[in-house]
Image (spheres, rainbow, N blue to C red):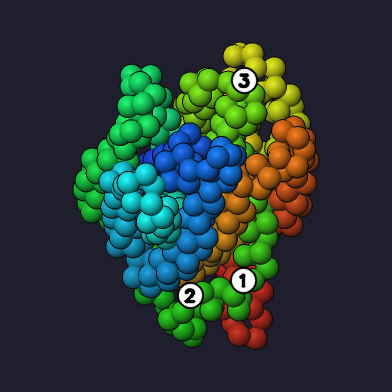
C-alpha cells in the first residue's frame, strides 16, 4: 500500500468515526434538550399543576435537575467500562438507554390522568435518561479525538461537540413547528409528545452507524502495554481509584473549569425562555426562534473554534470563552429586557456562541490531554458530569434568585459572573499537554514530551 493509499484509508476511517460519534451524540443531546424545553414550556402544568405557575415551574425544573444528579453515576459506571472494555461497546449502551427512556417519556400519562404517579414516573425516566447521558460525552469525544492525528485533534475533537448545537437546533425546530402548526389545546393535549416519540427514528439510525465503527487506536494500543512503559506495573481494574490516586489535581481543575460552560449554557437555553415568557410576557415563539438561530450558528462555531485551537491552543480559546461569560452576564439581560426582536436575537446568539459553545468545542480535547488514556474515559466523564450538577440546578436557582429580586435578573447575572471568574482561574492553573505516570513513588504529572522520551 502506497503512502497516499494509507492516508486515504486513514482519512476515510476518521470520517466514519466522526460520523458515528456525531450521530449518537446528536440523538442523546436532542433527547436531553427536548426535556429541558418541555420543562420550560408545559411540564409544569401537565405534571406539576399548582395555583401558582411559578411553583409548577419549579417542580418541572426540579425534575429537570434530577437528570443531572444521575449523570455522575452514569459517568462513573460507563467510564469504568469504557476504560476497561472499550469506547465503542460502551457507547452502544448509552445511546440505547437514552433513546428508550426518551420515547417512554412521550408515552407517559399526565397528572390529570393518573395523579401523583405522573410526576413520579417522569422523574424516574429522567433519572434513567441522565444515567445514560452520563457516559455519552466522554465516549463520543474520545472516539474522534483518539482516532485523529495529534496536530488535528482540536478540530476533529470539536466536530462531535457540534452535535450539541445540532441537537438543540433539531429539538427547538420540532417544538417550534409543533407550536406553530397546532392549536394551544392540541399542543398541550398531545402535541408535546411528538418530539419525544421522534427519538425512536434517531435511535435506530444512531445504533446502526455506531455499530459499524472501529475501536480507537489509542485504546487498542493502551490495551497491550509494553513491559517498559510507566504504566506497566499498575492494575487498571478500577480506573476511578487510579484516577483519584494519581490525577486528583487535574480532575478538580477540570471540574472547576467546566462550571461556567454548564451554567451559562443552561441560562441561555432553559432559564432565558422562562424569563422571557413569564417575566417579560413575550410570546414563546420569539425565544424559541432566537434559540434556534443561536444553535444553528453554534454548529459552525464549534469546528471554527476547534480549528483555531490547533493553532493557538485549546487553553487560549477556553480562557476567551470564560472571560466573555463574565463580561456578558449583565448585558445579556439588558438586551433581553428591551424586548426588541433584533436585540433578543443578538443576545441569544452571542450568549450561546461566544460563551458556552466556544468552550464546549475545545473542552474535550483540552481535558483529554491531562488524563492518561487508561483512565481517560473515566476522567472526562467524572469531570464533566459532576460539574453538570451545577448546570442542572441552574434553572431552579435562577428562578429562585429571580423571585428574590422581584422579577429582576441581576442576582442571576452576578452569580453567573462569579462562577465565570472561578472557571477562568481554574483554566489558568491547568497545565495543558501533561499526562500522569503511574509510578507509585511519584504520582505527579510529567510533560508529554517526557513520557514520549522514556
- Residue 367 is situated, as x and y percent measured from the top left of the image, at 57, 56
What is the secondary structure assignment of the residue under circle 3? Answer: helix
Classify mark 1: residues with Cα within 10 Å, few (<14), some (14-19) or many (20+): many
| Alpha-carbon span between mark 3 and mark 1 | 43 Å
> Do the residues under discs 2 and 3 have CB atoms within 8 angstroms?
no
Q: Earlier along the polypeptide chain: callout 3 or callout 1?
A: 1
Count of numbered tags: 3
Residue 165, which numbered label? none
Front residue of 53/419: it is: 53
Please tell me whether residue 330 is drawn above or below residue 102 in the rendered image: above
| Alpha-carbon span between mark 2 and mark 1 | 11 Å
Residue located 41% across and 55% down the image: 116
> Do the residues under discs 2 and 1 have CB atoms within 8 angstroms?
no
Residue located 57% across and 61% down the image: 386
Q: Quadrant of the C terminus?
A: bottom right
The residue tagged 1 is: 247
| Alpha-carbon span between mark 2 and mark 3 | 46 Å
Tell us which disc is closer to us: 2 or 3.
3
Residue located 59% across and 75% down the image: 244
Inspect this view and state whether residue 355 appears: yes
Tell us which disc is closer to us: 3 or 1.
3
Classify mark 2: residues with Cα within 10 Å, few (<14), some (14-19) or many (20+): many
What is the secondary structure assignment of the residue under circle 2? Answer: helix
Please tell me whether residue 355 is drawn above or below residue 422 in the rendered image: above
Inspect this view and state whether residue 138 appears: no
What is the secondary structure assignment of the residue under circle 1? Answer: loop
Tell me if 51 is positioned left or right of 252 in this view. Answer: left
Classify mark 3: residues with Cα within 10 Å, few (<14), some (14-19) or many (20+): many
Q: Earlier along the polypeptide chain: callout 2 or callout 3?
A: 2
The residue tagged 2 is: 239
The residue tagged 3 is: 344
- Residue 82 is situated, as x and y percent measured from the top left of the image, at 39, 66
Amino acid at each position: 500500500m502506497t503512502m497516499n493509499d494509507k492516508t486515504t484509508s486513514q482519512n476515510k476511517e476518521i470520517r466514519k468515526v466522526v460520523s458515528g460519534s456525531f450521530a449518537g451524540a446528536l440523538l442523546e443531546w436532542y433527547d436531553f434538550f427536548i426535556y429541558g424545553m418541555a420543562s420550560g414550556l408545559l411540564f409544569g402544568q401537565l405534571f406539576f399543576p399548582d395555583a401558582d405557575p411559578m411553583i409548577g415551574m419549579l417542580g418541572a425544573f426540579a425534575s429537570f435537575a434530577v437528570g443531572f444528579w444521575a449523570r455522575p453515576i452514569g459517568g462513573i459506571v460507563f467510564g469504568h467500562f469504557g476504560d476497561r472494555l472499550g469506547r465503542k461497546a460502551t457507547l452502544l449502551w448509552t445511546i440505547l438507554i437514552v433513546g428508550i427512556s426518551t420515547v417512554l417519556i412521550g408515552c407517559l400519562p399526565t397528572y390529570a390522568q393518573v395523579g401523583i404517579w405522573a410526576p413520579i414516573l417522569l422523574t424516574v425516566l429522567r433519572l434513567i435518561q441522565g444515567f445514560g447521558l452520563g457516559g455519552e460525552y466522554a465516549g463520543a469525544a474520545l472516539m474522534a479525538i483518539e482516532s485523529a492525528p495529534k496536530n488535528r485533534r482540536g478540530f476533529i475533537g470539536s466536530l462531535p461537540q457540534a452535535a450539541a448545537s445540532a441537537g438543540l437546533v433539531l429539538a427547538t425546530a420540532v417544538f417550534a413547528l409543533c407550536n406553530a402548526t397546532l392549536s394551544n389545546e392540541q399542543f398541550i393535549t398531545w402535541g408535546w409528545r411528538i418530539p419525544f416519540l421522534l427519538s425512536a427514528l434517531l435511535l435506530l439510525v444512531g445504533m446502526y452507524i455506531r455499530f459499524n465503527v472501529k475501536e480507537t487506536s489509542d485504546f487498542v494500543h493502551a490495551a497491550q502495554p509494553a513491559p517498559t512503559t510507566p504504566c506497566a506495573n499498575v492494575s487498571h481494574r478500577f480506573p476511578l481509584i487510579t484516577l483519584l490516586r494519581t490525577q486528583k489535581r487535574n480532575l478538580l481543575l477540570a471540574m472547576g473549569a467546566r462550571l461556567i460552560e454548564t451554567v451559562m449554557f443552561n441560562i441561555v437555553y432553559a432559564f432565558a425562555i422562562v424569563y422571557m415568557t413569564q417575566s417579560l410576557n413575550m410570546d414563546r415563539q420569539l425565544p424559541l426562534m432566537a434559540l434556534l438561530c443561536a444553535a444553528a450558528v453554534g454548529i459552525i462555531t464549534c469546528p471554527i473554534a476547534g480549528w483555531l485551537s490547533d493553532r493557538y491552543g485549546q487553553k487560549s480559546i477556553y480562557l476567551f470563552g470564560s472571560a466573555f461569560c463574565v463580561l456578558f452576564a449583565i448585558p445579556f439581560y439588558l438586551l433581553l429586557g428591551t424586548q426588541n426582536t433584533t436585540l433578543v436575537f443578538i443576545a441569544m446568539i452571542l450568549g450561546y456562541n461566544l460563551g458556552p459553545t466556544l468552550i464546549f468545542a475545545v473542552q474535550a480535547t483540552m481535558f483529554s490531554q491531562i488524563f492518561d488514556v487508561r483512565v481517560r474515559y473515566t476522567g472526562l466523564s467524572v469531570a464533566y458530569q459532576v460539574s453538570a450538577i451545577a448546570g442542572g440546578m441552574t434553572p431552579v436557582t435562577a428562578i429562585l434568585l429571580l423571585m428574590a429580586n422581584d422579577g429582576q435578573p441581576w442576582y442571576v447575572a452576578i452569580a453567573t459572573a462569579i462562577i465565570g471568574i472561578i472557571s477562568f482561574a481554574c483554566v489558568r492553573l491547568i497545565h495543558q499537554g501533561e499526562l500522569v505516570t503511574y509510578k507509585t513513588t511519584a504520582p505527579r504529572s510529567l510533560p508529554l514530551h517526557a513520557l514520549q522520551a522514556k
